[in-house]
Image (cartoon, helix red, strand yellow):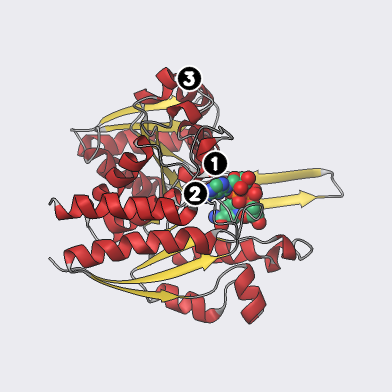
Amino acid sequence: MTKKLKILILAGDGIGPEVTAEAVRALEAVAQAGGHLFRFEEKPIGGVAIRSHGSPLPDDTLKAALESDAVLLGAVGSNEFNALPPSQRPEAGLLRIRAELGGFANLRPSFAWPGLTGNSPLRSDVVEGADILFVRELLGGLYFGQPREWDKQANAAWNTMRYTRDEVIRVAKVAFELARKRRKKVTSVDKANVLEVSQLWRATVTELAPQYPDVTLEHQYVDAMAMHLMNAPRNFDVVLTENLFGDILSDEAGVITGSLGMLPSATLGGKVNLYEPVHGSAPDIAGKGIANPLGAILTAAMLLRYSAGLEDEAAAIEAAVKHIVADGARTADLARGDKSVKVLSTQEVGKRVLEALSSRMAAR
Ligand code: NAD
């Protein structure tokens, strides 16, 4: 069935435009092969938007985002604006668009790519076969709870970790549903031995579990989980966490992948889904054509899966990435200074993905 999709491209700063261009090419290839109608619109965000509009998130960009079916973001951030207060810097545009779109479920896969397991600081035999999907609650918990304050006179500061039952239910449902399509296991992370908010979290997730009898639920304390992730990452399928724990654990699990440039993400549940690679604007390598585009390309695959329902096409992109990585395609971050490795440019890696993708699409 032909899919029609209005996709807003927010390439942003630094390597954002370089990697996003390759992700868009992959989406165009999918549209062409399947007769889908993807309409792309581009708007500024971050440092480029400050330069052109005097704001890191111009009204016009936000309006276009709210009117689109999906937003694909590159990265924001530029050293040029380091002297500005945080609320006027490029990153403020990203925080605001996330809040305005309102997604509460942040999905971050961590996958041990065959051929790249040697890049992880963990032993290959530990990471091989690891395939974890983090579902992190994004709008609640310590980052948003009130009261919060740094009382300088009292020399004291406090934040509040707060969740309602409904907030836990809506994100837990996302985790259970996704687990159904994977290896049917949810690991819910909390600190229920100490925190009341975690007791509510655990009780709510446990109460929901019988609605998903085909999914196994286990609970882990966050401290133990930090250790298990490194000792036995293969034991995990979908990992459900509140905001702060998920922030920390998903970064930790990122080492399984071997490079920040390989990590995609999606934020679901709001007015419009937001898709962005995990990495930043990497000013140290921007403009050199050497950034790894695979995180952005894998982010495009998530967009196809969660905003277009094009599961086969998403899987085809992932299979193409798997193929070229196993075949030795490497940007500099993946070559890790090994002189015997032929290092490819951002565009060359993008082209390899397209070739592998088109042969997969043609074979269907
Ligand atoms: P970063 O992710 O930009 O870079 C960290 C390191 O990883 C750098 O050495 C960089 O060269 C490398 N790297 C990152 N992505 C890569 C890729 N695709 N291919 C190859 N190497 C890659 O993080 P940072 O240096 O802490 O931040 C730089 C700027 O990006 C800052 O302004 C920061 O605020 C911003 N930032 C934005 C986002 C976002 O847009 N989502 C996320 C993190 C940081």
- Name the residue that disc number 3 marks: 123
> Few, some or many C-alpha atoms within 10 Å of disc 2 (few <14, some 14-19, many ≥20)?
many
Placement of the N terminus among the 4 image quadrants = bottom left
From the viewer's side, name the closer residue of 164 and 185: 185
Q: CA distance from mark 1 to mark 2?
A: 7 Å
Asked if the residue at label 2 sits under 8 Å from ligand 1, the reply is yes
Tell me where residue 70 appears, x and y as whole percent: 36, 66
From the viewer's side, name the closer residue of 324 and 252: 324
Tell me where residue 158 appears, x and y as whole percent: 70, 44
Q: CA distance from mark 2 to mark 3?
A: 23 Å
Q: Which amino acid, mark 2?
A: Asn
Q: Is residue 267 above or below residue 134?
A: below
Judge from the rendering whether residue 199 lies leftward or rightward of residue 145; answer left or right: left
- Name the residue that disc number 2 marks: 292
| Disc number placed over residue 81 in the picture, else none | none
| Disc number placed over residue 333 in the picture, else none | 1
Q: Residue at x 48, y 33 (%)?
A: 253
Q: Which amino acid, mark 1?
A: Asp
Callout 1 touching callout 2 (CB < 8 Å): yes
> Few, some or many C-alpha atoms within 10 Å of disc 3 (few <14, some 14-19, many ≥20)?
some
Asked if the residue at label 3 sits under 8 Å from ligand 1, the reply is no
Quarter assignment of residue 351: bottom left
Q: Which circle's residue, 2 or 3, is located before the other in the chain?
A: 3
From the viewer's side, name the closer residue of 91 and 138: 91
Q: Which amino acid, mark 3?
A: Arg
Label 3: element kind: loop
Q: Residue at x 80, y 50 (%)?
A: 151
Q: Residue at x 46, y 31 (%)?
A: 256
Q: Residue at x 42, y 50 (%)?
A: 349
